[in-house]
Image (cartoon, rainbow, N blue to C red):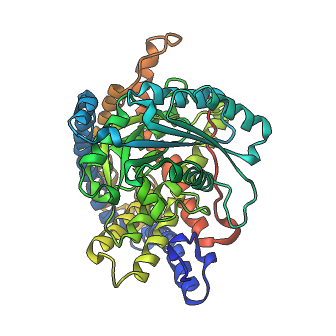
Amino acid sequence: MPFDYLKIASAEDLQGRDHFLYRVLEILPAFLSWGTLIILIIMSWQKPVWVSFFIIAFDIYWLLLVIFLGLHLIAAYIKLKKNIRIDWKKKCAEQKNWQDIYHIIILPVLYENEGIVRTALQSLIDDGFPPRKMIVVVTAEERAGQDACVRHKKVLEQYEDKFFKTYFTLHPDGIAGELKSKGANQAWAARQVKKDLIDNLGIPEENFTISVFDVDTIVRPGYFHRLTHAYLTVENRHRASYQPVPVYNNNLWDASFFARVAAMSNTFWQMMQQIRQEKLATYSSHSMSWQTLNEINFWSTNMVSEDSRIFWHCYLHFNGDYRVEPLYYPVSMDVVMDRTVWQSLRSLYKQQRRWGWGVENLPYLMFNAFKRRKTIKKRNTFSRILVQLYGFHSWATNALIIAVIGWLPLYFGGSDFTTTVLSGNLPVITRTLMTIAMVGLILSAVISTLLLPSRPKKYRAIKFFIMIIQWVILPVTIIFFGSLPALESQTRLALGGKWRLGFWTTPKER
């Protein structure tokens, strides 16, 4: 049986030349990010004039990027609001086969309390799609302990007469070759569901979608009608994943301001990516064809970033003939919130670092694209690689270039530089361009206000104004909860071995 390169997690799964090539590709993102920062630091000392002109050009680029992304954010928001107003149940009724579609929903759980699981299940009932067309799977971890597993099972049993089928599974601990991760848990659950349910129902595989939701996900009413309509109307539905917009609204009013800004910034990024479909990959809670998932033999069980890896796995398996269909429809999720503010900040950093660990998909994509170079769509794949490479590089470096390196020529340039006109004008030009770029902050504040859930009665009206003013900390947030965790993830990937990240579960407190 030939070796399956699409199931590899790292260079450690390979030998010989393959191992060497994969290690080079794992080092590449950190090499580029650190190389950029180090060269600019050295050049600030040796060639401050050059760096000054670069900083001015970079600030102009940043301003244009803010405007460009702002226009995309506005367009995405308009599409989102439009889709929320559409009667998707009526749209589905216009499709003659819509009642043939069944939805499998997998909810992996670990230490979450039963209230969070119950809220997720109730949101499926409240969605409005016929529950008798849903198979709901709660999959617990054996390592969470017997008490947690019993509690999760009892919650599901309260809903077993509501859905077409409910299924509870316990993912065994210590399976050889598996990472202790959400991906391993949901892969185990999907295989059990296939064996015990799907293979025995007599319903064609193509009539099933599968959605994997973080257990804190609350679907907005109409989501499954929207998904069903997309599944029935898009071209080649088995060559697509279906991506909602994650809006972190569940506990937004209760979370710390740093966590709120980071969460809403991520929402805005996901909204903008839906406009740019050629750059969109699956993220967090999403849906896809069960037939497709079965064809690729489910998720890899040794991955941290399983939510995005499943897209790249499918993309490579089908030689570039795979895409993400944006739904422009929201699902609500939790903002990071721990027991204390300091614990919340620590957890927020870890969450951002885990998201930054998605960089592990970059060597995976480049390596497997090279292995499939004779059959894969070369132009499209090369574009995808460049987009991913640019994205992770800018994530790790852009904020640091603007906030830190942009001022270094003034301190390291020496007397020859500090007496020049350029030296005197550099801070003025930088401040002016960044002030103009503040329009991005204003836009973020406005749209975040439009997406806010109703203010809980326990909070006074002044809390509303705090939710707007909080956006002034965005520059700090994108450094400490953006660039730094992303740079750490890339560095850990480059170092390999014991430095690799394991899966970390975000604490969920409400």
Of residues 497 and 400, the one nearer the viewer is: 497
Q: Is 67 left, or right, of 251 in this rendering?
A: left
Left or right of 318 in this view: 3: right
Question: Is residue 196 shown to the viewer in this render?
Answer: yes
The image quarter containing residue 150 is top right
- Look at 43% across and 36% down and name the residue there: 133
Q: Determine the image quadrant of residue 13.
A: bottom right
Q: Residue furthest right?
A: 146
Location of residue 402 (image quadrant):
bottom left
Left or right: residue 308 versus residue 140 is: left
Quadrant assignment for the N terminus = bottom right
Outermost residue toward the bottom in this view: 17
Query: In this rendering, is residue 259 above or below 488?
Result: above
What residue sits 39% from the left and 64% below the top? 388
The location of residue 153, given as percent across then percent down, is 68, 34
Residue located 53% across and 73% down the image: 26
How far across and down, in percent of the image, does residue 375 sit?
33, 81
In terms of depth relative to the viewer, which is nearer, 280 or 286?
A: 286
Q: How many marks?
A: 0
Percent x, y of residue 200 = 53, 50
Most foreground residue, 133 or 488: 133
Residue 331 screen position, x and y as percent: 41, 35
Is residue 227 something one can see in this rendering? no
Is residue 230 found left or right of 116 in the rendered image? left
Q: Against 10, is 475 above or below?
A: above
Image quadrant occupied by the C terminus? top right
Query: Which residue is nearer to you in this view: 202 or 472?
Result: 202
- Measured along the vertical axis of the image, is residue 420 above or below residue 276? below
Q: Residue at x 54, y 49 (%)?
A: 352
